[in-house]
Amino acid sequence: MTGANATPSPREEEWWFGTWDIQKKVWPITKGRGVTVALIDTGVNATLPDLRGAVLPGTNIIGPKGNGLVDYDKKFGHGTAMAALIAGQGTGVGMVGIAPEAKVLSIHSGVEDLAPAIDYAIERGADVINVSQGLASPPAAGGCGTDLQRAISRAIRKNIILTAAAGNDASIGVMNAEPALCPGFMAVGGVDYRFDPWVDSQPAPYVAVAAPGVRVGSIGKNGAFIPNLEGTSGASALTAGVAALVRSKYPDMPAREVVQRIIGTARDVGTPGRDDKTGYGLIRPYHALVDRVPQDAPNPVFAALDRIAKPPVEGSRQPSNGRSGHRLPQTARTGTRSAIILISIGVGIVAILTAVAIYASIRRINRRRMIS
C-alpha cells in the first residue's frame, strides 16, 4: 500500500489479488489515481459504503432521465458489481477494486445505444471505457455498426482505451459479439484460478487477452457480496482496471501503446501461442507497468483499426455495406465500359439488396441474445 491513504485488504474470495500480487507489487506503483473509467452498463448504486466516493454521476442513455446512479439490473446489480471490481473501496463488506483510486463514471445504456454512450464518455473526459455487455449473433450477420464504429474512432482520437467482454456463448457454437468485435475495442476472454480458459468464454479471432472470469465475486446493488460469479463481464471490468493503472502511471502514453503493453506482457495460457479463447494470454498488471515492450510487439486491436482507417484509392468509389466500417471491394475497375460488366453490376446490386434484407431479419432475431 502507498501513501497516507491506506486501502483495506481485499476479501479472501478476490483470488486475482494474489495471482497478480496487487498489494505488494502493483499498488506501490499506482492505484489508479487521476484516471476515470466510464462504465457503460446497467447503472451503479453509488450509495453503497464499498463505492462511496468512487463513482461519478453520469447519465441514463436509456430509461428514465437520471445520472446513472441507480442500478436497473433486476437480477443482482450488474453495473454495481463491475464498478466494485474496478474501484471498490473495501469500506462496507470489504469489496476492493484493483484500481481503488480511480473514478468510475456511470453511464446507464444498452448495447443498442452504445454510440451516444461512448460520445458522452468522451465529453466527460473518460480515460478508459468498459462495456461488460454485448449482443451475440452469427458471424454471417455482419460486423460493427457504422454509427458505433464512428463513435469508437472518436474515442480513439481522444486517446481513450476501450475494453469489452468477449461473450459467454461458446456452448452454442461460433458467435460474434458486438462491441467486442469492433476494431478499437480490446476484447477480453475469461480464465479460472488455474489459468485455464473458461469453458463458456466465447472464442473469436478478435479476442485480444484474458482475465479472471470464474469465481469472480463482487457486490450487488443491495451491497451484499455475491460469490462465484462467472462470465467475461468481470474479466473485461478487471482489464479496464488494469488499463486505468497503466494510464495512471503513464498519463501521457497514447492509448495505442497502453493496449500494446497490456497485450505484450500477457502470459500465454490455454493453447500454446495466440488462441481464440484467451487471445495473447492472461493479463499481468505489474508487467504491464514495468516491462519493456518492443515497438513491433503485436497490437491486433489497433491493427484492425488501422485496416479500416486506410483511405480508398484516389479516384475510386468505395461503397458502404451500411453496417460496418469495413469497405466493400469495388464491383468493377474504374473506366471499364463493357456491357458485361454493367450487367454484372446490376446483378450485384440485386444480390446486395437481397442480402441486406436477409441480414436485417437475422439481426432483429439475434439482437435479442444478450451477453454479459
Image (spheres, rainbow, N blue to C red):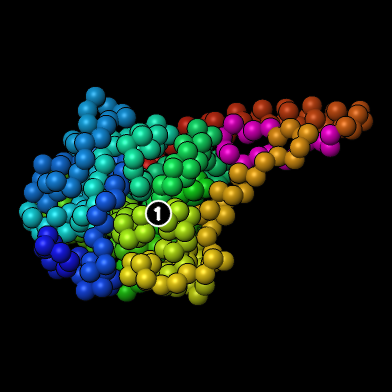
Q: Is residue 42 left or right of residue 325?
A: left
Residue 328 covered by magenta stretch:
yes
Measured along the vertical axis of the image, is residue 177 above or below residue 8? above
Give the number of callouts: 1
Residue 226 covered by magenta stretch:
no
Residue 246 visible to an observer of this rendering: yes
Nearer-the-camera pick, 240 or 210:
240
Nearer-the-camera pick, 55 or 157:
157
- Where does residue 349 sit, x and y in percent of width and height? 73, 28
Instruction: Write the residue at 48% across / 72% down.
Output: 271
Measured along the vertical axis of the image, is residue 253 above or below residue 316? below
- Where does residue 227 sit, x and y in percent of width and height? 18, 59
- Prevailing secondary structure of the magenta residues: loop
Instruction: Write the residue at 35% across / 63% down.
Output: 211
Instruction: Write the residue at 20% across / 65% down.
Output: 14
User: In the image, which residues are magenta?
Assistant: 319-334
- Residue placed under numbered mark 1 in the picture: 252
Q: Amino acid at mark 1?
A: Asp
